[in-house]
Image (cartoon, rainbow, N blue to C red):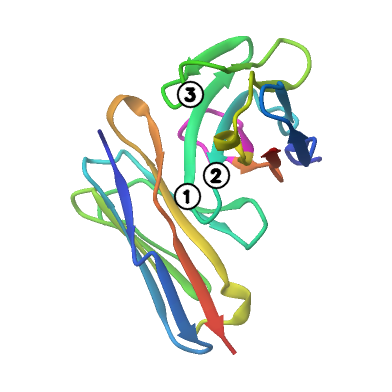
């Protein structure tokens, strides 16, 4: 079956360092969404990418959708303690089913 | 505009009992999704409903689990004869347009089976 994997599973960074999480699908995705979940909280929508090769920025966050629409990345510049949480990608694949990635848990050390 | 509401926030059930989880979508949203999250794990899609219809239940276990979204009232996720393995956080999300729209999540119901 279709799978959406994210790497790394866990990431610890010093405050101020950059962070990147990668999302890889076994099949082509029609679009991709990114969510953030704080510890003990619920997922919150961050952004949606639709076009092949699309790049979007939100302040220190940069999102990319791969040319083949099978992968995506989220890059955070100069992490802050408020960036702590788990970042999930999610996308639509075969049969319009919606798949969440396995998530990357980010810890920021002050 | 109230967000997605779920109740109860915490639910404790003994093995063999029934669990009923409720979800009220955001105002104006007619698309509801249920997800299960085990501790330290990702979100697993369970079911997608639109008013009075189940659109996709491919992630729902075949037995003991059911979901509905009636014309009036909240969406209900029902788990019959709960087992310890059902202990998890159950999140509901809603969207305005459909599966290609951003989803707004509720705070979740943490189910503990003793």
Q: Label 1's element?
A: loop
* Marks 3 & 1, CB-CB < 8 Å contact: no
Chain identifier of the residue bearing label 3 in the image = B
Badge 2 local density, few (<14 within 10 Å), some, or many (20+)?
A: some
- Of all residues, the one furthest to the left in this rendering is A68
B95 in the magenta segment: yes
Q: Where is residue A54 in the image (x, y as percent from the top left)?
A: 32, 56
On screen, residue A14 above or below B22: below
| Residue range corresponding to the magenta coloring | B91-103
User: Is B19 left or right of A16, judged from the image as shown?
Assistant: right
**Depth order, front residue of B38/B56:** B38
**Depth order, front residue of A27/B68:** B68
Would you name the residue on which mark 2 appears?
B37
Would you name the residue on which mark 1 appears?
B42
Do discs 1 and 2 belong to a common subunit? Answer: yes
Q: Label 3's element?
A: loop
Image quadrant for the C terminus of chain A? bottom right
B40 in the magenta segment: no
Do discs 2 and 3 belong to a common subunit? Answer: yes
Q: Position of residue A52 (x, y in %)?
A: 25, 50
Query: What is the distance, in whole Å, between disc 2 and disc 3 at their CAs?
Result: 13 Å
* Marks 1 & 2, CB-CB < 8 Å contact: yes
Do discs 3 and 1 belong to a common subunit? Answer: yes
Q: Residue at x 74, y 32 (%)?
A: B13
Q: Along the polypeptide, which appears first: circle 2 or circle 3?
A: 2
Query: What is the distance, in whole Å, between disc 1 and disc 2 at their CAs?
Result: 6 Å
């Amino acid at each position: 079956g279709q799978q959406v994997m994210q790497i790394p599973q866990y990431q610890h960074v010093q405050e101020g360092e950059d962070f990147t999480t990668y999302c890889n699908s076994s099949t082509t995705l029609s679009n991709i969404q990114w969510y953030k979940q704080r510890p003990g909280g619920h997922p919150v929508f961050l952004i949606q990418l639709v076009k092949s090769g699309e790049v979007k920025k939100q302040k220190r966050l940069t999102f990319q959708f791969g040319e083949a629409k099978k992968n995506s990345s989220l890059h955070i510049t100069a992490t802050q303690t408020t960036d702590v949480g788990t970042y999930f990608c999610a996308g639509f694949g075969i049969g319009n089913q919606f798949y969440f990635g396995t998530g990357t848990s980010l810890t920021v050390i002050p | 505009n109230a967000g997605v509401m779920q109740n109860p926030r915490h639910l404790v059930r003994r093995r063999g009992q029934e669990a009923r989880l409720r979800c009220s979508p955001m105002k104006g949203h007619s698309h509801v999704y249920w997800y299960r999250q085990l501790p330290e794990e990702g979100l697993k899609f369970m079911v997608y409903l639109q008013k009075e219809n189940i659109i996709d239940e491919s992630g729902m276990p075949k037995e003991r689990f059911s979901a509905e979204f009636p014309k009036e009232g909240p969406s209900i996720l029902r788990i019959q004869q709960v087992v310890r393995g059902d202990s998890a956080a159950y999140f509901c999300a809603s969207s305005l347009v459909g599966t290609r729209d951003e989803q707004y999540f509720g705070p979740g119901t943490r189910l503990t089976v003793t």
